[in-house]
């Protein structure tokens, strides 16, 4: 980052933060920013403004939720209106019905919904549901898929768990870990072997892997998962915390025409406010308390602010050119990056999010991603930051585009990427 005498504020905040928080941060990936995490005072459209008064073009976008860009006026208006009416009732409110209607309208697998407060809670609840509904214990997940920060899934997890070398977290009881089988992504043979040999309650999968960089699925893999889980009476859970309302209004399940039994959502459906949701077949969701015996509860579940921001966001997605704009932005940027890198590399993109991998020929699963040159990726991140472009600090995250990433922003970004990539690769 260009100090220019003005980065004292971030630097000082960082010094304080290290005394106050483990590693100076409250979510580990943030500590990977080089040379040290900058602190943000505001966001507008495609930009972040740092405490050092630097403007950065943002391709992190809160790790995915901000598909309309920062501080979109429609979301501000809706949340302001809600604030005047209070923000927590401990009762149902109109907004949760409206948001659930939008989700069930657009997401093919969603007949009923349970709102929670994060993607982590959503996958935890979906897994418990699949166990409760089937009366089985085992879960199958895929190497490098990240489903949040709870015990059931911190086994061969991607994202910061891989970045910081804890794909299997300390503190997860061995008894819990032993209930989770892991297969390589895009590997149906392994999946079938596990389903045949074990009594599996649920298979949880990111329909596009977005937590080892971006890794697209083989369409046959998703279709095969559907057929196999049906054949073995296992619940298929699509973790669409990233892909939900990003690949289109119907998420990955519409994009790939594969309908799971349960879907977990988060990020975009809260318009950038904390949220999670489990949705799926009526009889499965009805297994949750109070109708059923699978427990879930939450003080902040379906809180009116997140509901309102989510409604405003989805309404905007329904009528704006967001998918056209974000796809175009990703295509131009990803292609230009592809052309600018001189060494062996891969650029993986799906609709409107992408990642590049240096020093490898193909990235089809987590093992391929681990072979990429992470040190060099980190230098690209650092040098781009000096030029005013913020990409994820970790190889194992994704670059996202938003409605605010118009041609002018992309043009400026392309010239900066070219400069850095031609110099470093
Ligand atoms: C696919 C996926 N599932 C689950 C989660 C967990 O969501 P949250 O961070 O909101 O708990 C994330 C991101 O963090 C994710 O990318
Ligand atoms: N990869 C994570 C979610 O998608 C990044 C967010 C975080 O862990 O802070």
Image (spheres, grey):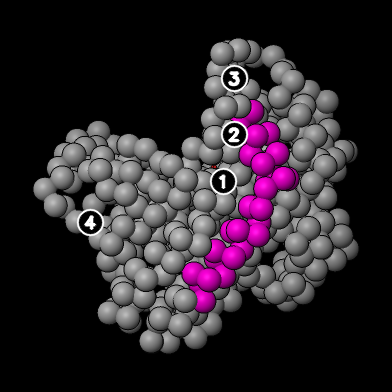
Pointer 4 or 3: first along the chain: 4
Q: Residue at x 72, y 69 (%)?
A: 191
Q: CA distance from mark 1 to mark 3?
A: 19 Å
Disc 2 + disc 3, Cβ < 8 Å: no
Q: Give residue 205's position: percent from left, percent from top.
A: 67, 58
Q: Which residue is mark 1?
A: 68
Q: CA distance from mark 4 to mark 2?
A: 32 Å
Q: What segment is highlighted magenta in the picture?
A: 308-335
Give the crowd class for mark 3: few <14, some 14-19, many >=20 residues within 10 Å.
Answer: few
Q: Which residue is mark 4?
A: 1
Pointer 1 or 4: first along the chain: 4
Give the crowd class for mark 4: few <14, some 14-19, many >=20 residues within 10 Å.
Answer: many
Give the crowd class for mark 2: few <14, some 14-19, many >=20 residues within 10 Å.
Answer: some
Q: CA distance from mark 4 to mark 3?
A: 38 Å
Pointer 1 or 3: first along the chain: 1
Q: CA distance from mark 1 to mark 2?
A: 10 Å
Which picture quadrant has residue 40? top left
Give the crowd class for mark 1: few <14, some 14-19, many >=20 residues within 10 Å.
Answer: many
Q: Give residue 60's position: percent from left, percent from top.
A: 45, 53
**310 in the magenta segment:** yes
Disc 1 + disc 2, Cβ < 8 Å: yes
Nearest-to-viewer mark from 1 and 4: 1
Please tell me whether residue 292 is drawn above or below residue 63 in the rendered image. Answer: above
Q: Secondary structure at mark 3?
A: helix
Q: Which residue is mark 2?
A: 74
Q: Which residue is mark 3?
A: 81
Pointer 1 or 2: first along the chain: 1
Q: Is residue 283 left or right of residue 211?
A: right
Q: Secondary structure at mark 1?
A: loop
Nearest-to-viewer mark from 4 and 2: 2
Quadrant including the C terminus: bottom left
């Amino acid at each position: 980052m260009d100090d220019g005498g003005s980065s004292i504020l971030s630097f000082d905040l960082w010094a304080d933060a290290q005394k106050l928080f483990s590693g100076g941060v409250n979510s580990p990936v943030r500590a990977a920013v080089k040379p040290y995490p900058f602190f943000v005072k505001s966001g507008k459209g495609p930009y972040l403004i740092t405490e050092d008064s630097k403007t950065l073009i943002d391709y992190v976008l809160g790790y995915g939720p901000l598909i309309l860009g920062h501080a979109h006026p429609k979301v501000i208006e809706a949340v302001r209106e809600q604030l005047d009416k209070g923000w927590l009732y401990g009762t149902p409110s109109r907004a949760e019905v409206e948001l659930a209607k939008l989700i069930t309208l657009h997401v093919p697998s969603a007949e009923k919904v349970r709102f929670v407060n994060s993607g982590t809670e959503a996958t935890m609840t979906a897994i418990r549901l699949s166990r409760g509904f089937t009366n089985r214990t085992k879960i199958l997940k895929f190497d490098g898929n990240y489903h949040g920060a709870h015990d059931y899934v911190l086994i061969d997890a991607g994202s910061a768990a891989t970045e910081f070398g804890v794909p299997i977290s300390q503190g997860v009881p061995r008894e819990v870990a032993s209930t989770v089988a892991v297969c390589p992504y895009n590997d149906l043979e392994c999946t079938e072997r596990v389903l045949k040999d074990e009594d599996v309650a649920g298979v949880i999968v990111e329909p596009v892997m977005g937590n080892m960089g971006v890794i697209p699925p083989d369409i046959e893999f998703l279709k095969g998962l559907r057929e196999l889980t049906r054949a073995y009476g296992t619940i298929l859970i699509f973790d669409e915390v990233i892909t939900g309302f990003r690949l289109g209004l119907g998420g990955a399940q519409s994009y790939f025409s594969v309908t799971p039994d349960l879907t977990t959502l988060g990020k975009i459906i809260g318009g950038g406010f904390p949220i999670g949701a489990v949705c799926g077949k009526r009889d499965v969701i009805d297994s949750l308390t109070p109708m059923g015996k699978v427990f879930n509860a939450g003080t902040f579940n379906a809180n009116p602010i997140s509901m309102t921001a989510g409604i405003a966001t989805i309404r905007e997605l329904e009528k704006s050119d967001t998918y056209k704009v974000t796809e175009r932005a990703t295509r131009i940027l990803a292609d230009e990056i592809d052309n600018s890198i001189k060494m062996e590399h891969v650029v993986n993109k799906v609709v409107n999010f992408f990642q590049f991998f240096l020093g490898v020929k193909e990235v089809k699963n987590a093992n391929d991603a681990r072979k990429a040159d992470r040190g060099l990726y980190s230098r690209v991140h650092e040098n781009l930051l000096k030029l005013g472009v913020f990409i994820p600090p970790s190889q194992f995250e994704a670059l996202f585009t938003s409605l605010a990433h118009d041609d002018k922003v992309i043009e400026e970004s392309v010239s900066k990427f070219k400069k850095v990539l031609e110099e470093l690769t």
